[in-house]
Image: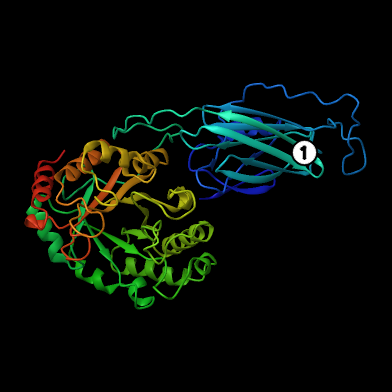
Amino acid sequence: MPAVAAGGHTWRRSHRRRFRRRELAALASVFAVALLTLTVPGVTAASATTTPPATTPPAASPSAAAPLDQSGQTSGVAAVPTLAIVLFDGDVVLVGGRGFLPGQNVKIEATTEQLGGSASMKAGGDGRVLLGFQVPAGFAGKVSVTASQGTRTASGELTVGTPTPAPTPTITPSLPAGAPETTSKLDTAGKLSGLPWMSGVHPANELQPYLDFGTWRGRQVDLAHVFTVREQGWDPIVEPNWPVNDFASFPGKLVISQPLYPEGVGNNAECATGAYNDQWKRFGAFLVSKNRADTIVRIGWEFNGWFMYWHVDPDPTNWVKCFQNVASAIRSTDPDVKIDWTFNAHGSPVPDGGTPWPAYPGDEYVDYIGIDPYDMFPPSPDEATFDRQCNDPNGLCYAAGFAREHGKKLSVGEWGVTSCSGDPGGDNPLYIKKMWEAFVANKDVMGYESYYDDPMPNNVCSTILNGGVNPNSSAEYKKLWDAGV
């Protein structure tokens, strides 16, 4: 995520609510303003979009002496600092403090039984501070806040919410709060398939199986998803003649999944320094030389699982900077390239927080918000299970809402039924049907999807071409994609 400067410090920007510039200026004229970043799972920085309700803090003792400021003069602020804590919009806790020495740092700490974080900011000229933070959806409990400046401390508590039943999931798209006035300018209509989005496949890394898949389903594929060799150093990654050369005659678009660095060669921290930028500039120049400047590049895909060697760390800082460096380097030699940020569905062991969103590198570095959902870990045997997973922060429908809010296109670079590997859903035509419905429901932001038609016996066994190992799912897919929208 990009950073914002507030109160003389750098804070990580939330992927949800943000101050509008006009409202920030209005608040800053009265208070020193900060956004609190909580580093323990489940809490993100946030701010109110209107002036908070008036709250009168306890009055300071009239006999207390006024404190001295840094120059030894009477500061004019109350001798005993106080806090006012209020709840705004159901999930934003606003903290207002007064009685601190102007221009000096105030440390603010917020904790619950399981969550917590801290920030430092300078008090305003009148000795006051204001900050806000967002609690997770459905949070219920006591929030304790302490503000300290040397020996001057103030604390308070606020009880937030009561447990409520989860709402009935839905895959019907709606415009999230704070959505931009403009949407993605990318033209992602399926010019070869005739679908509202680009539709593709990954059956192998040679051209003919892609053409065969299009013939079988009754619609040409708009894009071919390929992978580079990542165990042999930099050259086959940044100059991938195989497989790119085999697609010279392919009329559609390429999607290339790329690691952040070769296996056994790099790491997130070194990448964050820009050490690999020259390699990625080579890749951008390579795409241009092959007349594939408009390629979609999935940088460090499925980073939120331990199974990828380029996975994000519990603290996403280095990984985010690495992603930003890679995206910027490719764009420096190929301005037409499109960057895809893709996470693995269903769960996020990393980064801290249990969702992929703390590792979002920022809107300026991303063209597609991507997710790879398979019918596994866990599978979806019924509609209710699918809908619940789809709307989870690690799910497809949630990703669609995020894409819509940020003016991006949604991508589903890998998806499929699974008949082997861990916790598979088997030959499940319901999963095919629900995925199609999700694509159609979100066609306003749907950029592309690519079925992972894997015939390998010990991977995920998702193949549906000509029936494959999933004949019922194959028939459902062919029926839906052949009929179209």
Q: Name the residue at 34% across, 75% down.
A: 231
Q: Is residue 443 visible?
A: no
**Mark 1 Cα within 10 Å, few/some/many (few <14, many 20+)?**
some
**Which residue in the structure is indicated by mark 1?**
153
Regarding residue 344, the answer to whether it shows in the image is: yes
Q: Quadrant of the C terminus?
A: top left
In this view, 85 is above or below 227: above
- Is 192 in front, or is 300? 300
Answer with the quarter of the image where residue 241 lies. Answer: bottom left
Residue type, mark 1 in image: Thr
Total number of numbered discs in the rendering: 1
Image location (x, y in percent) of residue 472: 9, 48
Residue 287 is situated, as x and y percent measured from the top left of the image, at 33, 66
The answer to whether residue 261 is above or below residue 29 is below
Quarter occupied by residue 79: top right
Residue 297: where, in percent of width, then height? 34, 59
